[in-house]
Structures are given as structure tokens and as C-alpha cells.
């Protein structure tokens, strides 16, 4: 296993880390609550035995069961070999005591007296300006560091790019941050600019979705043709991971692996991970892959956000992105699954066709015509 500096910690971190959002399940459903505990434990311990020393979970993963299963897997001596990370669900904090109450519950589920790396989960500009400051969560986190319940505090980010610097620069004690980043997300959310800003401030960057939820592992045929024709003989997953490890600003790639085969494949690739591993020709291949993917775009939304805020509450850029993803990656089920996590008030069916957004859209997209089509395509059938 290769390691990189975890700047504000006294321990280097493995270049591959294990995410526990997609543990193996029983009875179907990639994110379902019925985790195959025996197989999940086998995978977690195998990863640690092979050198992975950063394991990440969160309060809501697998219907709240991920922390419990991870806590069980880290028994028998595995806990002290691991930097354990979990997250505070800031959207569930509505009262002064909620932060400490939830942290206490997480410590019990994880069967530990401390969490090494504690994240404020899924920060957005609204959460930053509202929940974090209104309930003094940074001060509460500092108190938890002082009494030993957590080792350090960071944040994971899910919002538009302009919000990232405000959050990163808004607190000078961030020990690390976590962003969605891969060769298709260079301008989405924090993007490359956010990665480099964090690195310039000495804040380690944990990368989530390095293979875009598995989508970059199974490209459609035209993109596979480019991969097969490249001088460098890499499989799709290796292109995605090497592109990340090529960048010294990336501290570790956090991969949510669902099978032992996926874990073993990624471990084998991690053994050769190093900054500067891609040649100029390799970067040209990545550029070709990115171009071919983008040519599959259905709605030419650039996520400029001139359409926002929507008077009816629709998150127009995110809705368009999920719809496009279904076609970019031949993954309608995956897009449906992601759409199910969009808050009800922000889904496409809330569009009232007021046309405010269309007057402001530089691309002149007929947004009000797209919204019902998108909802009909992405909405899961309601149970009887």
C-alpha cells in the first residue's frame, strides 16, 4: 500500500480508503438496510489487512446500519489499526442538544470511545450559514476534540462551486475536507479549483465518488473503443483512479466497494499509485473520454445557476444533471436512485411553469417543458 501525508494528523493515510455506503447487501438494493454482515466484515478486515487505514461511514448510510456493522467489523483488534471517520448529519440538527446526542449514539453504534475523523456531512451554503452557525456546531466539535470524543473535524461538500471557498475559508481549523471529484467532475461542485484551493491552504482532500458511483467502470461501447485503442493498457477503473492519484493534491481516493472482487482490483491498483503517473498522451486519452461522455448530453445545461433560485423550490441544475447522467453513462437506474434523494420540494414535478428561469437562462433552455418529462423519467413508482 502507498501512503500520503495527512497534514494535520500524526499518521499518513493510505491512497485507497474504504467507504461504507455501498457495503454488500442481502435481498437487493445497493444502499439498502439489509447488509450482508459476514461478507461486509470479511471485506473490511481484508482491506485493513492489506494496508487500508482510513474507513469512512455516516449516520444515514444503509438506513442507519452502516455504523453498526462497521463497529462490529472493527472488533478483534482492527479498531486501533484504523483511522475511523463518520459524519454528523447536520440536516437533523434542530435543537441545541442534537449534535452531542447524535455523536453519543454514533459512538455506541461504532463501539468506540472516540472517532478519529469527524465530518460535518454534506455541507452546503445554506447549512453553513444556517445550521452550523445557528447551533455553534464548530464550537461543539472543538469541545468534543478537547474531551477526546473526536480526534479532528472536517467537512464533506455537496453544493455549487461558489459555496466551497466560503466554507473552506470560514474556519481556520479544518483538519481535512471531502469532495466529489473524478475526471468527469472537474467543474462540478468543488471541482479542480476547490481541490487546489484546499491544498494551497494545507487542508488534506479526501476524494469521494472517484469512479462516479461505478459509472466510469463500465463505459458505453464508443468510450470503451478509445480505452482499447490507447497506448497505455489500462482498464476503465484504472484510468479513473490513476487520474486522481496522478494529482499530488489528492490525499486519498475513497471508494465504496460492494464486492470482494472490486476491493481486490482496487487494492492491486493502489500498490502502484503515484503522483505524476500519467503521461501527456494519457491525459489526451482522458480528454477524449471526457469529450465523448459530454457529447451524450441531452440537455445543454452548463450549471451556471442563472435560473436559481426557483420560486417553486426546484433545484433546476441538479435535476438536469441527474437526467443527463442517465444518458451519459447508460445508467437510468442509477439516476433514478440519485433522484430519489433529491428533497421532495426540489424535484422537477414542483415546477409551476412561471418561466422566471427561462427568462434568465443564457442557454435558452425551455426549462418548464423539460421538468415534467424529467420527473416522469426519473421518479420511482410510489408503493401501493
Image: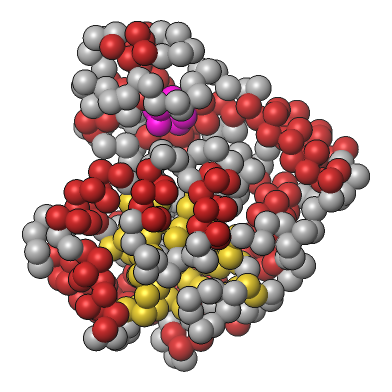
Q: Which residues are magenta?
A: 317-322
Please give left or right for residue 251 compared with residue 153 in the image.
right
Q: Nearer the viewer, residue 26 or 307?
A: 307
Residue plotted at (37% across, 65% down):
172
Q: Is residue 70 visible?
A: no
Residue 167 is inside the magenta segment: no
Residue most toward the right? 231
- Residue 238 lies left or right of residue 95; in this view the side is right
**Residue 110 location, x and y as percent?**
32, 77
What residue lies at 55% left-to-right and 67% top-to-bottom? 17
Query: Viewed as shown, does residue 345 lie left or right of 83?
Result: left
In the rendered image, the quadrant that contains the N terminus is: bottom right
Q: Residue at x 45, y 8 (%)?
A: 364
Establish if 301 lies above or below 209.
Answer: above
Q: Is residue 272 left or right of residue 166?
A: right
Q: Position of residue 221 (x, y in %)?
A: 74, 31
Look at the picture and state if 201 lies above or below 224: below
Q: Main secondary structure of the magenta part?
A: helix
- The x and y percentages for residue 313 are 23, 27
Q: Quadrant of residue 148?
A: bottom left
Q: Residue at x 10, y 67 (%)?
A: 97
Quadrant (top left, top right, bottom left, bottom right) of the C terminus? top left
Return the residue nearer the eye: 168 or 178.
Answer: 168
Amino acid at each position: 500500500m502507498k501512503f500520503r501525508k495527512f497534514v494535520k494528523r500524526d499518521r499518513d493515510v493510505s491512497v485507497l480508503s474504504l467507504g461504507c455506503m455501498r457495503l454488500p447487501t442481502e435481498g437487493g438494493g445497493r444502499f439498502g438496510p439489509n447488509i450482508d454482515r459476514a461478507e461486509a466484515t470479511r471485506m473490511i478486515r481484508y482491506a485493513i489487512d492489506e494496508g487500508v487505514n482510513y474507513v469512512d461511514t455516516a449516520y444515514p448510510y444503509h438506513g442507519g446500519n452502516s455504523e453498526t456493522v462497521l463497529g462490529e467489523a472493527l472488533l478483534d483488534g482492527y479498531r486501533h489499526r484504523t483511522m475511523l471517520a463518520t459524519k454528523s448529519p447536520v440536516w437533523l440538527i434542530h435543537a441545541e442538544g442534537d449534535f452531542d446526542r447524535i455523536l453519543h449514539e454514533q459512538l455506541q453504534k461504532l463501539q468506540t470511545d472516540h472517532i478519529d475523523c469527524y465530518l460535518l456531512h454534506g455541507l452546503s451554503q445554506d447549512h453553513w450559514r444556517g445550521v452550523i452557525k445557528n447551533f455553534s456546531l464548530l464550537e461543539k466539535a472543538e469541545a468534543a476534540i478537547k474531551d477526546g470524543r473526536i480526534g479532528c473535524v472536517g467537512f464533506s461538500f455537496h453544493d455549487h462551486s461558489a459555496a466551497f471557498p466560503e466554507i473552506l475559508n470560514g474556519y481556520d481549523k479544518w483538519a481535512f475536507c471531502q469532495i466529489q471529484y473524478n475526471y468527469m467532475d472537474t467543474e462540478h461542485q468543488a471541482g479542480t479549483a476547490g481541490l487546489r484551493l484546499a491544498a494551497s491552504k494545507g487542508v488534506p482532500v479526501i476524494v469521494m465518488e472517484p469512479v462516479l458511483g461505478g459509472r466510469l467502470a463500465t463505459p458505453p461501447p464508443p468510450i470503451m473503443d478509445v480505452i482499447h485503442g490507447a497506448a497505455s493498457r489500462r482498464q476503465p477503473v484504472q484510468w479513473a483512479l490513476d487520474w486522481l492519484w496522478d494529482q499530488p493534491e489528492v490525499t486519498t481516493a475513497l471508494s465504496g466497494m460492494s464486492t470482494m472482487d472490486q476491493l481486490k482490483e482496487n487494492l492491486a491498483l493502489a500498490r502502484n499509485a503515484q503522483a505524476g503517473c500519467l503521461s501527456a498522451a494519457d491525459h489526451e486519452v482522458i480528454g477524449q473520454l471526457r469529450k465523448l461522455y459530454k457529447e451524450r448530453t441531452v440537455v445543454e445545461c452548463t450549471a451556471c445557476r442563472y435560473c436559481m433560485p426557483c420560486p417553486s423550490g426546484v433545484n433546476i441544475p441538479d435535476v438536469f444533471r441527474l437526467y443527463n447522467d442517465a444518458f451519459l453513462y447508460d445508467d437510468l437506474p442509477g439516476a433514478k436512485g440519485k433522484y430519489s434523494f433529491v428533497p421532495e420540494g426540489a424535484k422537477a414535478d414542483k415546477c409551476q411553469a412561471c418561466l422566471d428561469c427561462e427568462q434568465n437562462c443564457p442557454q435558452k433552455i425551455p426549462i418548464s417543458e423539460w421538468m415534467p418529462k424529467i420527473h416522469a423519467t426519473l421518479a420511482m413508482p410510489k408503493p401501493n
